[in-house]
Image (cartoon, rainbow, N blue to C red):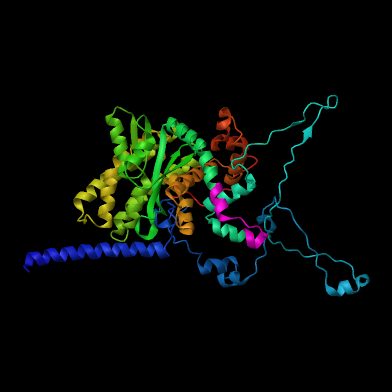
Amino acid sequence: MSQEESQKRIEELEQQVLILTQQLDYLKRQLYGRKSEQIDHPELFGEDVPGKDGSSGATSAPEEDDASGGESPKTKGNRKRPIRKDRLPEHLPTRTEEITPAEVLAAPSKWCQAGYEESFQLEKEPGYFYLRCIRRLKFRLVDNPLVPPIIEPARPAMIDGGFWGPGLLAEVLANKYLYHLPLDRQRVLHLQRHGVDLSPSTMGDAVEKIADQCGILVTRMKQRMLESGYVRADETFIRYLDRLEPGGSSRGYFWVYRSRDGDAIFHWTTTREHHHAAEWFGPDYEGIVQSDGYEAYVNYSNAQRLQGKDVTRVACMAHIRRKFEKAQAERPAVSGWILRIIAQLYRIETTLRDHGASAEVRARVRQNQSRPLINLLNKAFKHLSITLPILPKSGLGKALEYALGQMPDIQPYLEDGRIEIDNNDVENDIRPSAVGKKNWMFVGSPDAGQRSAVIYTLLMSARNHGVDPQAYLRAVIEYLPGAKPNEIDVLLPANWAAANRHAHPAIKSNTPRVA
């Protein structure tokens, strides 16, 4: 082997070692590090950030504790802390249990009460089943008994002849799609706890019939979403049963589309081919498409513009940020500086969101504060890609290549206050399905995939609109079969939430919005 070949081989091995080192570092952080993508990590901010004192977040120095007369951390950890009642939910009823010493019970006349001590526990009893008897009364005219009696017609049901009520059906679906409990596990749970045997096949049939009839709501939601002119899109894979494939299953996809007002539509396909996105949007859509760098959305936007359609594709800052976060081990100083600039962009967005800024205000603030930071990032990416000896296959090389390709499509968010800085709201909608597939492994047949998409659409949209998803689904199951064509819109998640948010509010999560 010549010296030139040896040197080339050494460079190849060094590049391979660097890539494997980056992968190992990333896997370590996935296993042992922080999973949250919050942008307020202390290590990403400079010393000039309000509220950040540059410390590591540890407790105060020992001498400060001594000066204040406080207890040591060891003493504090051993001290028993009573549960404060004001930290318990105020709306719950209280059941009081009085405990009397045995000596008092033996001779109550010798004792008088001198007070009491009380403690509180948050307790729960399992839910219960009951039989709902629907008695439709018949009435006959008093002065004309020969006229046939009248009776209120039976309300149409989603499942003809079914004996499960809307509340039970809604709970079965919510348990599976919101709380990731497969149907067979639900059967075991109800059988052991309540002595009620819910057949998994009956539950599966109920899912099929409900999803098939609720498709009309999804169709109407899609129409309204496309008319709004702003759609955010993402996709996630999920396995389905396929006897023709090795192992008996294959990979399908949920394509998730979200409007600005909170509607989230799941669309099922058995492949990730580009034409699925184009077919969903259709040839007549005009407006904004926000996504990651997947070519399906880029190609659709370009094709629409060639056809004279006004379609603007907007990139996602979170995807740019993540690639530099993964490359931190390679060049901490470079990646850290970039992440700090992106953190400043997110702080601006947080301030706007906290103050409920309108689209017009958001656009003006971004022009004044965010645009200089975006321009700085653009210059930095171009400079680093030219001056630094970065291997194209390295983490930083891939991050720079991706950022340079996406930055032109970041610009529209600076000019249009309706547009968000990233696509993370869509990823939050995807999360339940991503967690759920770890429990129930696959959606079943390809047809079952589309039915699951319908149920996810209704549940996630109701949650986004601030109502209890299970309560909303119960209302749909109960009232949709008898609804007239002009009453369908009343059962859309946005409209139902507007009328029932006070009665069925969603429980807000304390999980912060990811960056």
Observer-nearest of 322 and 489: 489
Most extreme residue toward the right is: 109
Range covered by the magenta-colored residues: 190-206
Q: Residue drawn 56% across and 42% down?
A: 466
Residue 306 lies in quadrant: top left
Residue 105 spot, x, y in % from top left: 87, 71
Q: Is residue 305 magenta?
A: no
* Left or right of residue 117, residue 461 in this image: left
* Left or right of residue 272, residue 51 in this image: right
SS majority, magenta: helix
Observer-nearest of 400 and 56: 400
Residue 228 spot, x, y in % from top left: 44, 31
Question: Is residue 413 visible in the rendered structure shown here?
Answer: no
Q: Residue drawn 51% across and 45% down?
A: 455
Residue 492 spot, x, y in % from top left: 54, 35
Q: Is residue 194 magenta?
A: yes
Question: Is residue 448 visible in the rendered structure shown here?
Answer: yes
